[in-house]
Amino acid sequence: MIRIKCKKCGTDYSFEDSEIEFECVGSDERSMGTENAYSAEIEYDCEKCGNSMRAQFDLWEYPIGAYNYSEYLSFGCTVLEEPNYWKYLQEEPEPDEDEQQ
């Protein structure tokens, strides 16, 4: 569950983890293998006051399958609860169309 709070009027909003999609934004080779960086964001206009809110969540996986580090940036809102990063790392990737044939 992700929760943010509008900085203008204080209204809280909740989003399911499934409402955001992390995308791989970088990759490096390190001593224990590959380190991947992922990023996802929520953009939402407050229904009460119209304030534009945005939260960006960044996640690093190193080695593959292991949570290494996370951080977030917020604009127009306060992040009350971050996504479940561990759950994202444990999800099975969807097979490519080529692999299904």
Image: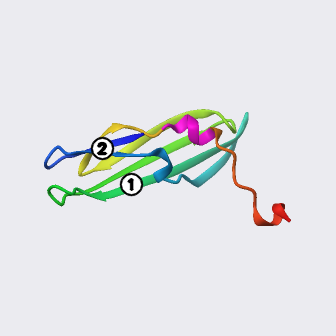
Q: Secondary structure at mark 1?
A: strand
Q: CA distance from mark 1 to mark 2?
A: 10 Å
Residue ID at (69%, 45%):
92
Residue ID at (56%, 35%):
86
Is 54 placed left or right of 67 in the picture? Answer: left
Expressed as whole percent of the image width and height from the top left, the position of residue 11 reads: 19, 45
Identify the main secondary structure in magenta.
helix
Residue occupied by mark 2: 4
Determine contact: label 1, label 2, CB under 8 Å. yes
Q: Residues within 10 Å of mark 1 (few under 14, many from 20)?
A: some
Q: Quadrant of the N terminus?
A: top left
Is 38 placed left or right of 32 in the picture? Answer: left
Disc ID at residue 42: 1
For residue 66, above or below residue 10: above
**Based on the displayed image, in which of its 4 quarters is residue 79 positioned?**
top left
Residue ID at (81%, 66%):
98
> Counting residues from the N terminus, which is met first, the one under dot 1 or under dot 2?
2
Magenta residue span: 84-89
For residue 100, above or below residue 74: below
- Residue type at the position of mark 1: Ile
Closer to the camera in the image, 62 or 97 = 97
